Image (spheres, rainbow, N blue to C red):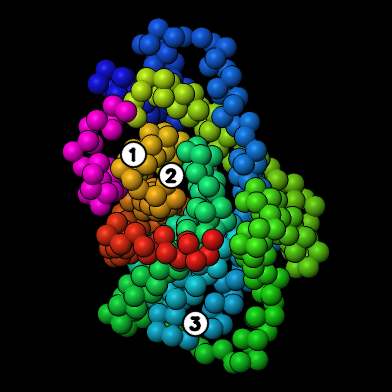
């Protein structure tokens, strides 16, 4: 109990006083070292360096770069134009455009923030012009953005797989069907809102214009086909898929769509480099803490506290998901993975739960946390892009958040919704 108290007090205390999460993690590791009378500065440095000296983590900078290139090079905009051409004429059509574009973009970038920023920048002004309620428009865009970490390629799956030694390829494939279900549940919620508020629709696009939009988006649409096809066919690994995605996005942006010049390339690489540095430092800092957590035998201590429900996987999963939902309200997805992944994953294995299924559920709940106050990282992105009050975005997100929670309940009660499609695809 003393180890747990030190872990929580130092980590949470550091964040409360405004310390960056990575620094809080390192400080937590140092505090545990002092408590165990095991302080060694050389060991601290070695674990910090080992946290990002990991081949699978090479996927992270390349997926970040691919997302930046997509937004700067016109791939994201063409995907949105394609969705608008086919479903924009339905009542509340721009909302369905947002959902369709969110699913398509999710199969390319794997970043909730990048996808949400692209969707909000392009669609939010159009939704305002059509007279849509600002709250529901913003809430839908935020809710659609969190599909990105679920449908492969996914940065959170890469980080979770490396952190917990879970197959990244299987995690990728596990996210395909549930990601589509998330889109379906958003369609149901938005359809109800569109009917209730009698939302406007756009003019129907003629078939020649639809075919033109399809032709213009062809090269953008080929990106998920190449990535998913290569992964399923065993042509390349998830890490290699990230490189393929980045190179493909660069070539299409520079030489096909020609919306990116060399000055823009510099800005894209600079932005991707800054984001990568933050993520990698987090990974290194979390490795320090994870090493000390293992040394302090914290997973087994937690297992003892869960011993009463370890024999009932559904009850165990339900309690674990509630715990992670609470964590997600106060912490971003990447720190949640790095801090709690190494602790929770061994417990799930002891409870007899499939590690890939648990890994998917861990990331799914973490994604829900991105649209849950008070932190709500993705909600902050939409509020910033749309210059909206955070309260407005939170209110508009509520119906979609409830749909995601309902889907979470289904996933807990019926694990085969995830494991059965995984077995078929794998």
Residue in the picture at 40% in, 84% down: 91
Picture layout, residue 409 above or below residue 292: below
* Residues shaded magenta: 300-323
Q: Residues within 10 Å of mark 1 (few under 14, many from 20)?
A: some
Instruction: For the C terminus, give its image quadrant.
Output: bottom right
Q: Which residue is label 2 attached to?
A: 333
Mark 2 or mark 3: whose residue is earlier in sequence: 3
Q: Which residue is label 1 attached to?
A: 350
Is residue 394 found left or right of 130 in the rendered image?
left
Residue 165 inside the magenta-drawn segment: no
- Which-is-in-front pick, marks 3 and 1? 1
Give SS at disc 3. Answer: loop
Residue in the picture at 27% in, 60% down: 413
Is residue 20 found left or right of 350 in the rendered image?
right
Picture layout, residue 28 above or below residue 359: above
Disc number placed over residue 263 in the picture, else none: none
Q: Residue 256: which quarter of the image?
A: bottom right
Comparing 195 with 410, the one in front is 410
Q: Residue 225: which quarter of the image?
A: bottom right
Residue in the picture at 81% in, 64% down: 255
Disc number placed over residue 88 in the picture, else none: 3
Q: How far is mark 2 from mark 1, CA to CA?
A: 24 Å
Mark 3 or mark 1: whose residue is earlier in sequence: 3
Q: Residue 224: which quarter of the image?
A: bottom right
């Amino acid at each position: 109990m003393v180890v747990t108290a030190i872990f929580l007090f130092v980590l949470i205390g550091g964040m409360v006083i405004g310390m960056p999460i990575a620094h809080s993690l390192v400080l937590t590791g140092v505090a545990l070292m002092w408590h165990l009378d095991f302080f060694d500065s050389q060991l601290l440095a070695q674990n910090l360096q080992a946290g990002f000296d990991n081949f699978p983590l090479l996927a992270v900078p390349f997926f970040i770069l691919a997302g930046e290139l997509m937004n700067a090079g016109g791939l994201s905009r063409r995907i949105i134009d394609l969705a608008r051409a086919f479903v924009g004429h339905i009542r509340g059509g721009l909302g369905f455009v947002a959902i369709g574009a969110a699913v398509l973009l999710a199969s390319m970038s794997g970043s909730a923030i990048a996808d949400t920023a692209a969707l909000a920048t392009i669609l939010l002004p159009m939704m305002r012009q059509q007279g849509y309620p600002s709250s529901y428009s913003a809430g839908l865009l935020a809710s659609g953005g969190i599909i990105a970490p679920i449908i492969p390629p996914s940065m959170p799956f890469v980080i979770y797989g490396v952190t917990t030694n879970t197959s990244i390829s299987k995690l990728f494939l596990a996210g395909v069907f549930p990601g589509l279900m998330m889109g379906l549940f958003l369609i149901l919620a938005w359809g109800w809102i569109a009917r209730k508020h009698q939302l406007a629709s756009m003019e129907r696009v003629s078939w020649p214009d639809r075919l033109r939009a399809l032709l213009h988006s062809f090269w953008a649409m080929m990106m998920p086909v190449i990535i998913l096809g290569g992964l399923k066919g065993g042509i390349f690994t998830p890490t290699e898929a990230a490189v393929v995605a980045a190179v493909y996005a660069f070539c299409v942006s520079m030489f096909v769509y020609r919306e990116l010049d060399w000055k823009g390339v510099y800005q894209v690489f600079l932005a991707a480099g800054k984001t990568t540095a933050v993520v990698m430092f987090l990974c290194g800092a979390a490795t320090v803490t994870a090493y000390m957590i293992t040394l302090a035998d914290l997973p087994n201590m937690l297992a003892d506290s869960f011993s009463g429900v370890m024999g009932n996987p559904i009850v165990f999963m339900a309690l674990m998901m509630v715990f992670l939902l609470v964590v997600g309200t106060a912490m971003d997805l990447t720190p949640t993975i790095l801090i709690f992944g190494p602790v929770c994953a061994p417990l799930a294995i002891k409870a007899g739960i499939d590690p890939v299924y648990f890994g998917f559920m861990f990331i799914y709940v973490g994604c829900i946390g991105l649209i849950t106050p008070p932190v709500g990282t993705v909600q902050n992105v939409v509020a910033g892009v749309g210059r909206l009050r955070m309260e407005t975005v939170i209110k508009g997100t509520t119906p979609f958040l409830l749909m995601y929670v309902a889907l979470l309940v289904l996933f807990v009660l019926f694990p085969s919704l995830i494991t059965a499609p995984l077995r078929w695809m794998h």
